[in-house]
Image (cartoon, grey):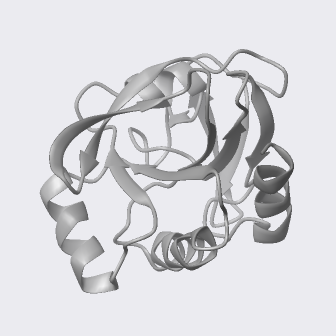
Amino acid sequence: MATVTFKNDIVCNLGGTEVNVGDTAPVTTVVNCNPMLQDEQIGGEGKVQLVIAVPSLDTGVCDAETRRFNTEAASLDGVEVITVSMDLPFAAARWCGAAGIENIKVCSDFRNKDFANAYGVLLADGPLAGVTARVIFVVGKDGKIAYKQTVPEITEEPNYEEALAAAKAAC
């Protein structure tokens, strides 16, 4: 079972089915926060997706990460960028409006945690149990995982350059 740390102290186990580079990306449905409550598919063939799992948009790190990917998405031709959190869609939509998010899809896995379980990114224990770990996937046009980055310390930002390069390479 994969793990991450919280505040460099508490080890948190990741639940669900772990997927890795080369695996077929599970097809799951999350709730798009804008347009409100519209289903959004993650996985499948035919398009490149940069999927960014974050615990909650209400944290400083998730806020900064989502804003950064929103800015970078403007130069990612042919890549669908989706951020997934466990935030309620209403709260996420309000956050997106305040943050000026226009280039990415911000979605919630709050209903039944299908994405988090199918991709193995659900924090199974610890103080943040029930939210997603900070993990980035690139799903290629062939429907396979082309890239995965699990941020080992949940309070730290990911390696943006590596994730963006992987998304561009998948096009």
74 to the left or right of 137: left
Where residue 100 sits, quadrant-wise, is bottom left
Picture coordinates of residue 114, whole percent (x, y): 39, 23
Q: Nearer the viewer, residue 102 or 37?
A: 102
117 is higher (above) or lower (below) than 36: above
Measured along the vertical axis of the image, is residue 146 above or below residue 159? above
Residue 29: quarter of image: top left
Q: Quadrant of residue 129?
A: top left
Residue 124 in the image: above or below residue 157:
above
Q: Residue at x 39, y 50 (%)?
A: 85
- For the point 48% across and 44% down, the residue is 132
User: What is the quadrant of the N terminus in the image?
Assistant: top right
Residue for point 39% across, 60% down:
56
How many numbered badges does the structure rendering display? 0
Horizontal arrangement in the rendering, residue 85 relative to residue 133 (left or right): left
Q: Is residue 115 above or below residue 105?
A: above
Q: Nearer the viewer, residue 132 or 99?
A: 99
Q: Position of residue 13 (x, y in %)?
A: 62, 34
Residue found at x 77% / y 48% = 149
Viewer-side residue, 151 vs 48 = 48
| Percent position of residue 130, x then y | 38, 38
Left or right: 83 as drawn, with respect to 160: left
Quadrant occupied by the C terminus: top right
Horizontal and vertical percent position of residue 49: 61, 42
